[in-house]
Image (tube, coloured by chain):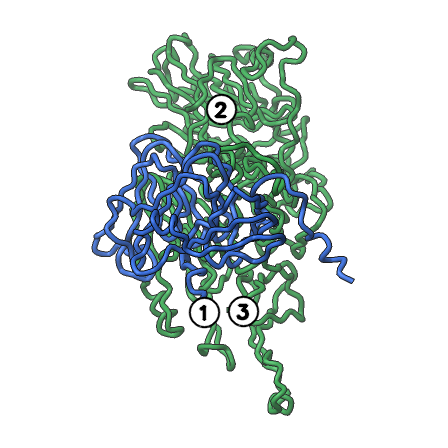
Chain colours: A green, B blue
């Protein structure tokens, strides 16, 4: 059941869902009118100090893709994907707005809503209708704002001007002001207006980057030369409505004194890569689940101290956008073995409960992963027989192994058989109690030994690579190279080790699980014939050697298949 | 000399059944409070405990179990500490407290002899690949220990009309009040399940829980032992 919000209501996101990967859908319609729905990423002064955080039809994503415009889907006029923990610290507030394209009045709109969906489940809905508005041409529907933690506020504040007035209100600038019409068609930014959104000042100041962050978010620049202060005639005063909304009582803490309307700060949003946070059962180092995408300048350091939050640091603990640590919070971890527990089946089994928050992929425990097919809507390919349970209407069909399977099958004698899971519902995958590691790829590539693939999004492209060499059982080692955007679940027997690739990294071909695709594999045989000729052969004659730039990694399992 | 091992000494007894680590069960035995355990599951005991394989009472209840063989249960009685394990599988201890649970036969490790229990074939399921699916329904006031290959997961069936489908090889236990149906996917190219070209699933509906293990290996390891 989504929580219903009224105008002025606020709540902490963490009270709505433990996830930070949110889908925000807006439905707004009116006979004969079209709407532009946009998201403004504002700084602490509620100014649009960085044009790249104005997410609208012409700029569908922010630089680090924390905010993405997804388009109309699932009954929503417009939808966004917001990954809260990737939003740079300069952005303190996201304001979702709807503006009428052309002439019209908000009073004519049909009942609509703004909703927040996390993991396929609607967690919040703010409904509005035309009766709440009069002649406005724009409306600020709702805000995500950072006050200790991310919170959501249902705003519902009308605004007389159109998109460009809204933009000015937030400190942005629209070029082509000389057009006499009161409402320059919103298509204009697409054509002539585009430069207006190009960051004019970025070339010169080049914000001082944080020393260790490869891609630092631009530092806040309140006195941005490119942004003219709003003209003297921005319709309603911008500052007034927002604070009044945020001073309204919170749903969670309705009657606290006015000064303290906000509930006490929750623990700060999970810092990336804090190992303790994703170890539900304590025996699984975080790094294997999150091999850093190739190209980041430093080797993975599984037990590095938690880096400060910041985009550039993300790869250490958590692949960007991956299931955040929060879901594990749902697992009661502290139950000491043998401690007296409540009676009854439910009490005894409560520590094994399904973790509720659903992303598309959720690790339920170290050995079971849940895929929610409703999120993202695309099919999942999985190893046949790896389904242990499913709910909802899910169709399993044979996935022709195709070229890939036949190559693998012919050469290794065992065909890698896949099944395609389509439909709506949740599917739980597991196999032989192997450890599972969901790896989210964001345009990068990874090679996984074919035997260690459990399931993956169909959106990923994959191809088989064949590594030949004398001494490899079966004549060759088959790996699947995945690339694109999506998640692949890798299984390992036992807790794996993630090694940075150095000039002298050698791996047993039977134990290798995965490696970053940028690493080059060489089969190295120890050519000490004389020693091999004796019966005291070590049995470790053939190894894989990896050659790559620093930053690549190899995953090895403690089990030689 | 064995300081690293000292940490594994038994903890003081606080309940009838406890986990020792996550893969071993420790039972505090008392005279008059007998235990039924899987044959061959004992790994150690301390005290005076006697074992009676296939006792008449069990034979009576479990006569349907698997034809031709005795029930794979033994009655343990006496005083002391009893340690049970099943080839490294995770052990889940449940204090029933009046509830009831249906357990897949191969996932049952031990339970108090004073509980009400019965063996039944899963209704609506003619036969599952190779092994008939038998389950033991246990209810009453007492303790039950289950095994699971890997950490199990508990899924709430939701109570609606929606069905939850489970691979029978991965099924551990479920609430007995759930409706159980067998489902065969006869679709031409539907190939789920282990090895066979036939897909079986069990469909559960109603209010209750299903316990699933992250492995589809339901081989009865204890059965292979002499």
Chain letter for mark 1:
A
Q: What is the crowding at mark 1: few (fewer than 14 residues within 10 Å), some, or many (at least 20)?
A: many
Task: First in sequence, mark 2 or 3: give its number.
Answer: 2
- Same chain assignment for discs 2 and 3: yes
- Same chain assignment for discs 2 and 1: yes
The residue beneath circle 2 is A96
Residue A218 at x, y = what percent? 65, 37
In this view, B23 is above or below A210: below
Q: How many marks?
A: 3
The residue beneath circle 1 is A478
Q: Residue at coordinates 30% horizontally, 54% vertically from top-left?
A: B132
In this view, the residue in front, A39 or A145, is A145
Residue A143 at x, y = what percent? 53, 22
Side of A206 relative to B161 (left or right): right
In this view, A3 is above or below A377: above
The residue beneath circle 3 is A560
Q: Secondary structure at mark 1?
A: strand
């Amino acid at each position: 059941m989504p929580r219903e919000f009224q105008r002025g209501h606020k709540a902490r996101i963490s009270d709505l869902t433990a996830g930070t990967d949110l889908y925000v859908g807006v439905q707004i319609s009116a006979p004969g009118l079209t709407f532009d729905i946009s998201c403004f990423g504002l700084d602490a002064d509620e100014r649009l100090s960085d044009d790249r955080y104005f997410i609208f039809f012409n700029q569908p994503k922010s630089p680090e893709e924390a905010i993405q415009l997804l388009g109309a889907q699932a009954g929503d006029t417009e939808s966004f994907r917001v990954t809260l923990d990737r939003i740079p610290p300069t952005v303190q507030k996201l304001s979702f707005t709807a503006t009428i394209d052309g002439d019209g009045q908000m009073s004519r709109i049909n009942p609509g809503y703004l909703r927040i969906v996390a993991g396929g489940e609607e967690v919040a809905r703010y409904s509005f209708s035309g009766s709440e508005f009069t002649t406005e041409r724009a409306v600020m529907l709702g805000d995500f704002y950072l006050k200790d933690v991310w919170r959501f506020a249902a705003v519902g504040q009308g605004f007389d001007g159109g998109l460009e007035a809204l933009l000015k209100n937030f400190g942005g600038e629209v070029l082509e002001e000389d057009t006499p019409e009161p409402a320059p068609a919103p298509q204009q930014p697409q054509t002539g207006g585009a430069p207006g959104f190009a960051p004019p000042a970025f070339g010169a100041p080049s914000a001082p980057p944080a020393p260790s962050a490869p891609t630092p978010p631009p530092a806040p620049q309140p006195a941005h030369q490119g942004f003219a202060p709003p003209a003297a005639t921005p319709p309603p005063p911008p500052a007034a409505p927002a604070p009044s909304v945020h001073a309204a009582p919170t749903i969670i803490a309705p009657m606290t004194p006015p000064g303290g309307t906000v509930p006490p700060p929750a623990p700060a949003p999970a810092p990336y890569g804090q190992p303790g946070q994703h170890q539900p059962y304590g025996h699984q180092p975080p790094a294997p689940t999150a091999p850093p995408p190739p190209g980041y300048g430093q080797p993975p350091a599984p037990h590095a101290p938690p880096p400060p939050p910041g985009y550039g640091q993300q790869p250490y603990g958590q692949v960007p956008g991956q299931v955040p640590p929060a879901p594990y919070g749902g697992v009661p971890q502290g139950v000491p073995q043998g401690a007296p527990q409540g009676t009854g089946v439910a009490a005894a089994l409560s520590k094994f409960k399904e973790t509720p928050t659903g992303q598309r992929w959720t690790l339920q425990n170290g050995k079971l992963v849940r895929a929610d097919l409703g999120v993202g809507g695309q099919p999942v390919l999985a190893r046949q027989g790896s389904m242990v349970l499913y709910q909802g209407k899910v169709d399993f069909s044979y996935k022709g192994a195709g070229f890939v399977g036949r190559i693998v099958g012919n050469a290794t004698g065992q065909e890698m058989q896949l099944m395609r899971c389509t439909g709506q519902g949740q599917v739980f995958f597991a196999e032989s109690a192997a450890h599972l590691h969901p790896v989210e790829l964001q345009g990068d590539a990874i090679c996984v030994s074919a035997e260690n693939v459990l399931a993956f999004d169909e959106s990923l492209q994959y191809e088989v690579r064949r590594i030949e060499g004398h001494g490899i059982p079966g004549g060759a080692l088959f790996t699947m190279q995945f690339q694109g955007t999506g998640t692949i679940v890798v299984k390992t027997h036992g807790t794996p080790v993630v090694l940075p690739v150095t000039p002298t990294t050698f791996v047993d071909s039977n134990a290798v699980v995965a490696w970053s695709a940028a690493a080059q594999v060489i089969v190295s045989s120890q050519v000490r014939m004389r020693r091999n000729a004796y019966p005291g052969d070590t049995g470790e004659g053939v190894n894989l050697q990896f050659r790559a730039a620093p930053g690549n990694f190899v995953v090895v399992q403690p089990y030689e298949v | 000399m064995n300081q690293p091992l000292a940490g594994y000494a038994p903890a003081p007894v606080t309940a009838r059944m406890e986990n020792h680590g996550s893969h071993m069960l420790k039972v505090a035995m008392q005279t008059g409070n007998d235990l039924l355990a899987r044959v061959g599951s004992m790994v150690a005991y301390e005290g005076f405990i006697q074992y009676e394989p296939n006792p008449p009472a069990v034979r009576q209840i479990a006569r349907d179990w698997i034809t031709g063989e005795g029930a794979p249960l033994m009655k343990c009685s006496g005083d002391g500490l009893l340690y049970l394990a099943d080839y490294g599988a995770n052990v889940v201890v449940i204090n029933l407290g009046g509830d009831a649970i249906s357990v897949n036969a191969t996932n049952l490790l031990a339970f108090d002899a004073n509980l009400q229990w019965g063996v039944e074939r899963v209704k609506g399921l003619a036969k599952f690949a190779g092994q008939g699916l038998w389950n033991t329904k246990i209810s009453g006031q007492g303790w039950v220990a289950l095994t699971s290959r890997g950490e199990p997961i508990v899924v709430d069936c939701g109570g609606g009309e929606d069905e939850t489908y489970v691979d029978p090889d991965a099924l551990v236990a479920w609430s007995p009040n759930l409706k159980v149906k067998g489902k065969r996917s006869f679709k031409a190219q539907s190939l789920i399940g282990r090895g066979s070209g036939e897909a079986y699933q069990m469909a559960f509906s109603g209010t209750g829980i299903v316990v699933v293990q992250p492995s589809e290996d339901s081989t009865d390891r204890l059965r292979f032992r002499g």
